[in-house]
Image: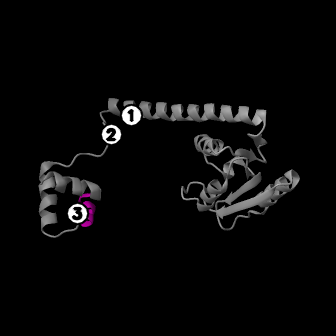
Amino acid sequence: MRIIGYARVSTDDQNLDMQQMAIEKYAEDKNLELIMYIEKISSRNDERAELQNAFKAAAAGDLFVVFKLDRLARSTKELYQLTDELKKKNVDFVSINDAFDTSTPTGRAMFGMLAVFAEFERDIIQQRTKAGLEAARKRGRIGGRPSVDEKTKRHIITLFKAGESAVDIAKEFNIARSTVYKILNSSK
């Protein structure tokens, strides 16, 4: 059994010392080996390399430890997904500051409630999205991008055949490059 520690701050000018020292003390108190992963990157960035490395290193029986829940995830849904991934690997999760520990019965109960809140959060977002789309429909909006009329499509095809790049055509007509290619492919 080891401790896989993960500490993160969002910017280079922030300090990791408090998180790191708390995780080191936790490992010392448990008398367990600590493997520490630290990074300075926003949680909005999905490419958190050290977090991915920490997850790869975590093995059955290990404890994955963070100082605070918000150092790991930015939403209940994301937190649930990450801790569920650990659970599948038989790795317990501990958040020192939040007193969250899935190796205890209380922690497992909290994990179950976290799952309920993640589902609730997802349902609320879906309901808001549906309500917003319905309100837009009632105002006469159907959503999506406006379609490209036939005259414009012919103009796009002519420009492309004349040597214009799809990127330049997309910019000129304020459409996506993929739309230009769809128009070109549909004309064949």
Q: Name the residue under label 3.
A: 169
Q: Which of marks 1 and 2 is nearer the N terminus?
A: 1
Q: What residue type is labelled 1?
A: Leu
Q: Of helix, strand and loop, which one carries label 1?
A: helix
Residue 40 is a magenta residue: no
Give the quadrant of residue 157.
bottom left
Q: Closer to the camera, 66 or 87?
A: 87
Q: Which amino acid does label 2 sit on?
A: Gly
Q: Is residue 79 visible?
A: yes
In the drawing, what numbered circle is on residue 52? none
Q: Which secondary structure class fits the magenta region best? A: helix
Question: Label 3 near label 2: C-beta < 8 Å?
Answer: no
How much space separates mark 1 and mark 3, taking CA atoms? 31 Å
Counting labels gives 3
Q: Closer to the camera, 14 or 102?
A: 102
Q: Badge 2: how crowded within 10 Å, few (<14), some, or many (20+)?
A: few
In the displayed structure, would residue 125 be above or below residue 16?
above
Q: Mark 1 points at which residue?
A: 133
Question: Label 3 near label 1: C-beta < 8 Å?
Answer: no
Give the quadrant of residue 5.
bottom right
How much space separates mark 2 and mark 3, taking CA atoms? 24 Å
Q: Of helix, strand and loop, which one carries label 3?
A: helix
Q: Mark 2 points at which residue?
A: 143
In the picture, measured across the screen, residue 137 lies left or right of residue 115, that is left
Q: Residue at x 71, y 45 (%)?
A: 93
From which residue to which does the magenta span run? 167-174
Q: What residue type is labelled 3?
A: Ile
Question: Label 2 near label 1: C-beta < 8 Å?
Answer: yes
Question: Where's residue 138, x and y in %?
Answer: 33, 29
Q: Of helix, strand and loop, which one carries label 2?
A: loop
How much space separates mark 1 and mark 2, taking CA atoms? 8 Å
